[in-house]
Image: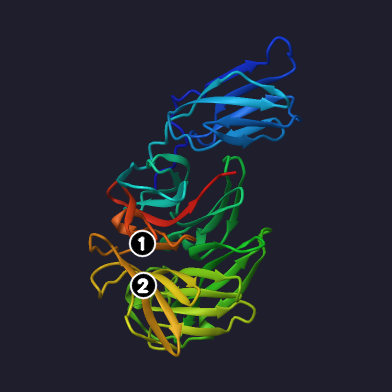
Amino acid sequence: MRSARRLPVLWCRPVWLLPACASDPSYTASVATSEEISTLVEVSYSPPEAEAWVEWEGQRFDGAEGRAVVYGAGAEATLELTVHVGDWVSEPLAAQTGPLPVEIPPFTVVDDGPLAPRFILASWLEAPDEGSGVVVLDAAGQVVWYDLVEGLGTVAFLHKVDGGVLYLVATHSYLPDAHAVFLSDDGRDRVTYPLPMAHHEVLPLPGGGFATLVGEARQIDGEDVVGDTIVEVAEDGTQRTIWNAFDHFEVEENEGWGVQAYPEGADWNHANGLAYDEATDRYLVSILRCTCVVAVERATGDIDFIVGGPDSDYAVDDAFGPQHAPGWTADGLSIFDNGYDLGVSRLAEYTLAGGEATLSWQWQHPGGYVTAVLGDFDRLDDGSHLSSWGTLGEIIYAEADDTLSWRVDVEPLHVLGQVEGFESFE
């Protein structure tokens, strides 16, 4: 894999200094392009202990300890800022963002209707396994924030958390080197959590920490087999295993035996998605090899129910699979259904009642296509939905009435991972 370049080497970091007016020479403010993320502008002010904030296009960015950061401008943009330090207000101050790293692929808006979330967090992977990274897009498809993966591994799973972004670096070929990364919004603070054999999710938990899926290799009847576990990681890095598939399912040969997704052994489970419901304290884990979704009690590790596959506790009226991105709903669950047998990928919700798993809603890909790998689905509070379509390279936002409103495409030969909407970096 190519090593990541943060900025082209010829880029110069401009700094503008604005002194206070002659009647009050004790205040100063300066602006500069961030050295960590070229689409950010850093504002320095003095005295550093003063209460301060920056205004840009009607937005307020609070300062602390002599520094504030302006988010959302995009690359190679000219900004006009006003700095407020105590009772002093600066004259308008010009600032400039830098160019994007050349490794970031172009994103193109192809449907430019309203987009409810102001920002879209997404991950991208270059095929075949050449590079990867994290981006934040605005409604115009501009990259306004980013991070690039260095060394082995790719990013497919990520979430916006308070103060930064949490993402997982892992590929099947390099699972021993898998790790989670927390990167602060300003790019200055990076915390790495070594997670050998982790894959397919890094899910923030209420109160801090996160959960992930971790493969475990065992020898069964003389053959190396990889099964999956749910592991929780505290903020200090402490880990505890919540659930282990080996404790609940009989190991039987399936199509994963010939795939060699893991060098460590046969791909028995291929768990590929995880959700958590705080109200009931349960996990929902998607297991590709049995085309099923399993509900797990967090406190005990017991299986509450299974939907889909040969051991389903519910009769499924409209079969799904393979699937990704499980989610809890008020009366059941949701999935991203890759829909191989159906012939089209879709977003789907199932109601669970009376021993029946009933398809209550679906939204098929508008072009009738199948994404072979990955896929994500988030139902938003107002009933609208945000989704990414893996190998199709699309992010789609649709209104609550299911009207497609906004869509962005990534450059061909790139795959999209998880996607998430959010309103503000502050």
Residue drawn at point x = 27 percent, y = 48 percent: 412
- Check disc 1: other Cα within 10 Å, few if <14, some if 14-19, many if 20+: few
**Cα distance between the residues tagged 2 and 1:** 12 Å
Q: How is the image coloured?
A: rainbow
Q: Quadrant of residue 60?
A: top right
Q: Quadrant of the C terminus?
A: top right
Q: 231 or 185: nearer the eye?
A: 185
Spot occupied by residue 188 in the image (x, y as percentages of width and height)? 60, 40
**Amino acid at dot 1:** Asp
Spot occupied by residue 77 in the image (x, y as percentages of width and height)? 44, 28
The answer to whether 245 is drawn above or below residue 413 in the figure is: below
The answer to whether 349 is drawn above or below residue 31 in the figure is: below
The answer to whether 347 is drawn above or below residue 78 in the figure is: below
Residue ID for mark 2: 361
Q: Nearer the viewer, mark 2 or mark 1?
A: 1
Residue drawn at point x = 54 percent, y = 45 percent: 424
Image disc number at residue 205: none
**Amino acid at dot 2:** Trp
Residue ID for mark 1: 401
